[in-house]
Amino acid sequence: QVQLVESGGGLVQTGDSLRLSCAASGRTLSNYAIGWIRQAPGQGREFVAVVSRRSGYSSYYADSAKGRFTISRDNTQNTVYLEMSGLKPDDTATYYCTADETLNNIVIMTPAYWGKGTQVTVSS
Protein backbone atom coordinates (compact mmCIF):
# COMPACT_ATOMS: atom_id res chain seq x y z
CA GLN A 1 0.00 0.00 0.00
CA VAL A 2 1.04 3.57 -0.72
CA GLN A 3 -0.42 6.47 1.22
CA LEU A 4 -0.42 9.88 -0.46
CA VAL A 5 -1.10 13.19 1.26
CA GLU A 6 -1.38 16.39 -0.73
CA SER A 7 -0.80 19.90 0.54
CA GLY A 8 -0.22 23.39 -0.77
CA GLY A 9 -3.58 24.20 -2.29
CA GLY A 10 -5.32 27.48 -1.71
CA LEU A 11 -6.99 30.56 -3.13
CA VAL A 12 -4.87 32.60 -5.52
CA GLN A 13 -5.37 35.20 -8.20
CA THR A 14 -4.94 34.88 -11.96
CA GLY A 15 -1.28 34.86 -12.84
CA ASP A 16 -0.09 33.71 -9.43
CA SER A 17 2.06 30.69 -8.70
CA LEU A 18 1.50 27.81 -6.33
CA ARG A 19 3.42 24.70 -5.34
CA LEU A 20 1.61 21.52 -4.47
CA SER A 21 3.33 18.80 -2.49
CA CYS A 22 2.58 15.11 -2.22
CA ALA A 23 4.07 13.18 0.67
CA ALA A 24 4.18 9.43 0.17
CA SER A 25 4.50 6.69 2.74
CA GLY A 26 4.14 2.97 2.96
CA ARG A 27 6.39 1.90 0.11
CA THR A 28 9.58 3.09 -1.53
CA LEU A 29 8.57 6.06 -3.64
CA SER A 30 11.18 5.35 -6.28
CA ASN A 31 9.28 2.19 -7.24
CA TYR A 32 6.33 4.22 -8.47
CA ALA A 33 5.47 6.72 -11.13
CA ILE A 34 3.78 9.68 -9.47
CA GLY A 35 1.36 12.06 -11.10
CA TRP A 36 -1.33 14.64 -10.65
CA ILE A 37 -4.92 14.41 -11.80
CA ARG A 38 -7.43 17.19 -11.27
CA GLN A 39 -11.17 17.53 -11.24
CA ALA A 40 -12.99 20.80 -11.61
CA PRO A 41 -16.44 21.30 -10.09
CA GLY A 42 -19.08 19.55 -12.17
CA GLN A 43 -16.52 18.21 -14.65
CA GLY A 44 -14.67 15.00 -15.27
CA ARG A 45 -11.16 14.20 -14.20
CA GLU A 46 -8.21 15.48 -16.20
CA PHE A 47 -4.66 14.20 -16.31
CA VAL A 48 -2.19 16.99 -15.47
CA ALA A 49 1.36 15.65 -15.18
CA VAL A 50 3.37 12.55 -14.34
CA VAL A 51 6.99 11.74 -13.55
CA SER A 52 8.44 8.31 -14.18
CA ARG A 53 9.94 6.03 -11.58
CA ARG A 54 13.08 5.22 -13.52
CA SER A 55 16.37 7.00 -13.17
CA GLY A 56 16.39 10.00 -15.45
CA TYR A 57 12.84 10.70 -14.36
CA SER A 58 11.01 11.53 -17.55
CA SER A 59 8.00 13.76 -17.13
CA TYR A 60 4.91 14.25 -19.25
CA TYR A 61 2.26 16.94 -19.22
CA ALA A 62 -1.22 17.62 -20.46
CA ASP A 63 -1.34 20.31 -23.10
CA SER A 64 -3.08 22.56 -20.60
CA ALA A 65 -0.10 22.27 -18.25
CA LYS A 66 2.81 22.47 -20.67
CA GLY A 67 4.98 25.52 -20.17
CA ARG A 68 3.24 26.49 -16.92
CA PHE A 69 3.51 23.47 -14.63
CA THR A 70 6.57 21.50 -13.57
CA ILE A 71 6.50 18.17 -11.80
CA SER A 72 9.48 16.98 -9.82
CA ARG A 73 10.30 14.36 -7.23
CA ASP A 74 12.62 14.05 -4.27
CA ASN A 75 12.91 10.37 -3.44
CA THR A 76 15.04 11.12 -0.39
CA GLN A 77 12.08 13.00 1.07
CA ASN A 78 9.43 10.71 -0.47
CA THR A 79 7.83 13.82 -1.88
CA VAL A 80 6.62 14.93 -5.28
CA TYR A 81 5.96 18.53 -6.22
CA LEU A 82 3.84 20.32 -8.78
CA GLU A 83 5.01 23.84 -9.41
CA MET A 84 2.27 25.85 -11.07
CA SER A 85 2.72 29.29 -12.55
CA GLY A 86 0.58 31.59 -14.65
CA LEU A 87 -2.51 30.19 -13.01
CA LYS A 88 -5.85 30.74 -14.67
CA PRO A 89 -9.44 30.38 -13.44
CA ASP A 90 -9.64 27.22 -15.60
CA ASP A 91 -7.04 25.67 -13.30
CA THR A 92 -9.53 25.75 -10.44
CA ALA A 93 -9.98 22.14 -9.34
CA THR A 94 -9.23 19.56 -6.73
CA TYR A 95 -5.77 18.21 -7.43
CA TYR A 96 -5.12 14.57 -6.63
CA CYS A 97 -1.72 12.99 -6.20
CA THR A 98 -1.61 9.50 -7.65
CA ALA A 99 0.85 6.63 -7.84
CA ASP A 100 1.24 3.51 -9.89
CA GLU A 101 4.03 1.17 -10.92
CA THR A 102 3.00 1.79 -14.52
CA LEU A 103 3.25 5.38 -15.69
CA ASN A 104 0.60 5.01 -18.37
CA ASN A 105 -2.00 4.09 -15.78
CA ILE A 106 -1.70 7.60 -14.42
CA VAL A 107 -1.98 9.15 -17.88
CA ILE A 108 -5.20 7.24 -18.55
CA MET A 109 -6.35 8.09 -15.01
CA THR A 110 -6.57 4.59 -13.57
CA PRO A 111 -3.76 4.68 -11.00
CA ALA A 112 -3.65 2.23 -8.17
CA TYR A 113 -3.28 4.84 -5.45
CA TRP A 114 -4.94 8.19 -4.85
CA GLY A 115 -4.56 10.90 -2.26
CA LYS A 116 -7.59 12.74 -0.91
CA GLY A 117 -6.87 15.86 -2.90
CA THR A 118 -6.08 19.51 -2.32
CA GLN A 119 -8.23 22.36 -3.56
CA VAL A 120 -6.84 25.03 -5.85
CA THR A 121 -9.02 28.04 -6.57
CA VAL A 122 -7.93 30.74 -9.00
CA SER A 123 -9.92 33.94 -8.93
CA SER A 124 -10.20 36.22 -11.93
Image: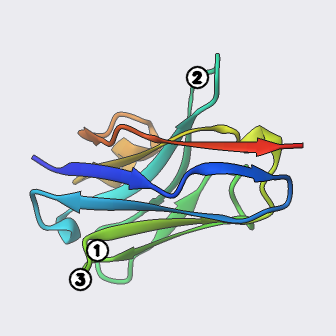
Q: Is residue 122 left or right of residue 60?
A: right
Which residue, given by chain and number where applicable, does mark 2 sit on?
Answer: 44
* Quadrant housing the C terminus: top right
Amino acid found under the numbered disc labelled 1? Arg
Disc 2 versus disc 3: nearer the observer: 3
State the mark number for residue 54: 1
Q: Is residue 121 left or right of residue 9?
A: right
Q: Residue at x 19, y 49 (%)?
A: 3
- Residue 75 percent location from the top left of the image: 26, 77
Q: CA distance from mark 2 to mark 3?
A: 33 Å
Q: CA distance from mark 2 to mark 1?
A: 29 Å
In the displayed image of the protein, which residue is found farthest to the top? 42
Amino acid found under the numbered disc labelled 2? Gly
State the mark number for residue 16: none
- Residue 121 percent location from the top left of the image: 69, 42
Up-down: is 118 above or below 40? Answer: below
Q: Counting residues from the N terminus, which is met first, the one under dot 1 or under dot 3?
A: 1
Q: Is residue 27 left or right of residue 100?
A: left
Which residue, given by chain and number where applicable, does mark 3 sit on?
Answer: 76
